Amino acid sequence: MTSRIVITGTDTGIGKTVFSAALTDALSGCYWKPVQAGLDGETDSQAVRRLGRIEARHILPEAYRLATPASPHLSARLDGVTILPDSLSSPPLVDAPLVIEGAGGLLVPLTERTVFADVFQRWRIPVVLCARTELGTINHTLLSLEALRVRSIPIVGVAFIGDERADTESIIGKLGHVRVLGRLPRLDTLNPDTLRHAFREHFEIDQIREALA
Ligand SMILES: Nc1ncnc2c1ncn2[C@@H]1O[C@H](COP(=O)(O)OP(=O)(O)OP(=O)(O)O)[C@@H](O)[C@H]1O
Ligand SMILES: [Mg+2]
């Protein structure tokens, strides 16, 4: 039986991939990005491989690789591709912990009928919600937690990314009735060594490992 975890976020561009790289490294796991929208420059899979120093065989191929950096439903339409949510109904089976990164946030559309959270709901795989620490994050994080709970998606906890805002982290923990797993600081120099060090300093990997399903 594989152990798996989903990394989602309150928004796009908040650091899910960087967090996933650190987590995949810490778990000696595999990484899977089911839907990659945007192929110019480094893809998320390539960034995880580089930042987590993950072996190539531990980066699983994306189910959909779409050219345009847009919401997957639009990116797919522009590419002339149809995303079939059923094709994502069971994540790949591997013999190491599997870290799965969604695209953008929970209610990002895959098609005109399906959002990412619908896929997560079918999986029932525990989710880490990545959240910024800056202004606006309390609302986004609490809304995302509601969206997870309404679908009975298991929540491991919130992982913050950014500069320390102790009150923000604590009010989200209280009002969201959620465990705060830690905070990955914004690193001036982001490379595999600084990332591994920061992750080890700010997160307890055993706490996350225990939640894998
Ligand atoms: N802890 C950090 N320290 C320094 N830079 C970071 C950190 N986290 C993220 N970044 C930078 O911020 C940008 C966005 O991060 P990332 O790609 O991880 O976001 P994302 O949430 O995965 O986005 P997407 O929704 O596109 O998948 C990247 O340039 C990344 O290198
Ligand atoms: Mg990403």
Image (tube, rainbow, N blue to C red):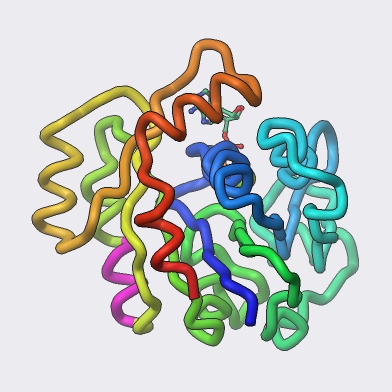
Determine the image quadrant of residue 48: top right
**What residue appears at the point 39 percent right and 78 percent down from the top-left corner?**
153
Numbered range of the magenta stretch: 144-150
Magenta-drawn stretch, dominant element (helix, strand or loop): helix
Question: Which residue is more in the foreground, 29 or 51?
Answer: 29
Please tell me whether residue 34 belongs to the stretch shown in magenta.
no
Q: The N terminus is located in which quarter?
A: bottom right
Residue 148 colored in magenta in the image: yes
Q: Residue at x 75, y 71 (%)?
A: 94
173, above or below 187, in the image: below
Name the side, left or right, on which 206 lies relative to 164. right
- Asked whether, in this view, residue 67 is left or right of residue 206, the answer is right
Question: Which residue sits at x=34%, y=35%?
Answer: 183
- Residue 72: x percent and y percent? 69, 61
Up the image or down, 49 lies above or below 66; here it is: above
Please state the quadrant of the image where ligand 1 appears: top right
